[in-house]
Image (cartoon, coloured by chain):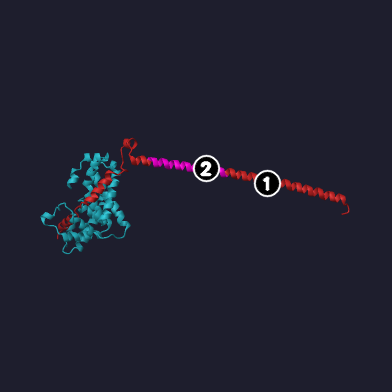
Chain colours: A cyan, B red
Amino acid sequence: MNEAVRQFTDHDLALARKGDAQALTALVLAHQRSVYSLALRMLGTRDLAEDLAQDVFMQLNRNLKSIESRQHLAFWLRKVTAFRAIDQLRQRARLATTSFDEDKHLEGDSHAHPYSDAGLSDPLLQRHLKLLLEELSPPARAVVLLRYQEDLDPVDIARTLEMPINTVKSHLKRSLEIMRQKTPGARLSRGEDESI
Amino acid sequence: MSQDDLEFQLRAALRPIAPSASFEKKLIACVTNDPRRAQPMAKRLGGAGWHSRTRWLSLAAAACLLVGVGLQGRMQLRRERENGLEARRQVVEALRVTSQKLDLAYEIVKSQSSSFADDNPGA
């Protein structure tokens, strides 16, 4: 959870519902990373992601009265973003590649990478994994993103995407299997998937 | 590489990205200035802004236009109906006059032929 999300309180949400500009700004700052990243990795290009993120926040703005809590707010944003992205992906056969837009973007990302200091991250492998993510079906991609980007557990993913829990688990298992098969040197024993 | 390592790398690869500063600015401006945002009732009725006032004005203008067009159409229909009735009346009158003239002509022809027969009994 980033600092902006932590700083956004229930009081801010109440003010945002009344149309307070400062509270609305805090709301956008708290959730824009999550919404934008989800949109970018689902749709693949920066322009489409920005359009979708803007539409989602505008839709939220008009439905703020129905938002009951901060948890509900995060749930609503993830759900609407994921569903709208899946709809867009279904409407078109194939999108331009994601990684170039995203990698360009990462260069200018001033936020500290939580793993970079530990010296454990592997940029090449991560790039490869992002490319593999593009090959997944839209629902599977959404499941993987909610699991590894948003850090939701399978129960919450099932609620967000209105999917049976077993479907979520099977998407996760199959997606990791695909990534494992297509990643050189990332061979795992089958029993290790049980941790999902 | 273990399952944990793969998941670790996935998490690292998929960490949230901040959008560009220009987009952030644009987004905040859009959200805070959205005229369609649900507003409190008092604000909607009393302190209505320029957008809602112009919306009401355009709605009123559209309604007036619709009523005007409707009335004009109705008057036009009425005029056409009156013209049709007048034309029918004239046709009926013309038929009546024609019928009278034909009757008259028939009477004349008939009276002439009977007087001719009286004058020429052998014919």
Q: Which residue is mark 2?
A: B74
Q: Position of residue B17 (x, y in %)?
A: 20, 53
Residue B94 numbered mark, or none: 1
Residue A106 numbered mark, or none: none
Asked if one can make out residue A155 in the rendered structure from this viewpoint, the answer is no
Secondary element at image label 2 = helix
Q: Earlier in the sequence, mark 1 or mark 2?
A: 2
Q: Residue at x 42, y 41 (%)?
A: B61
Residue A140 to residue B70: above or below: below
* Residue at the outermost bottom position: A184
Q: Chain of mark 2?
A: B
The residue carrying pointer 2 sits among few (fewer than 14), some (14 to 19) or many (20 or more) residues within 10 Å by Cα, namely few
Q: Is residue B66 magenta?
A: yes
Asked if one can make out residue B9 in the rendered structure from this viewpoint, the answer is yes
Q: Residue at x 56, y 43 (%)?
A: B79
Q: Residue at x 28, y 52 (%)?
A: A51
Q: Quadrant of the C terminus of chain A?
A: bottom left
Q: Amino acid at mark 2?
A: Arg
Q: Nearer the viewer, residue A39 or A48?
A: A48
Q: Which residues are magenta?
A: B56-80
The residue carrying pointer 1 sits among few (fewer than 14), some (14 to 19) or many (20 or more) residues within 10 Å by Cα, namely few
Q: Nearer the viewer, residue A10 or B95?
A: B95
Q: Chain of mark 1?
A: B
Relative side of B11 to B37, left or right: left
Distance of label 1 from label 2 (alpha carbons): 30 Å
Secondary element at image label 1 = helix
Q: Amino acid at mark 1?
A: Ala
* Residue at the outermost right position: B122
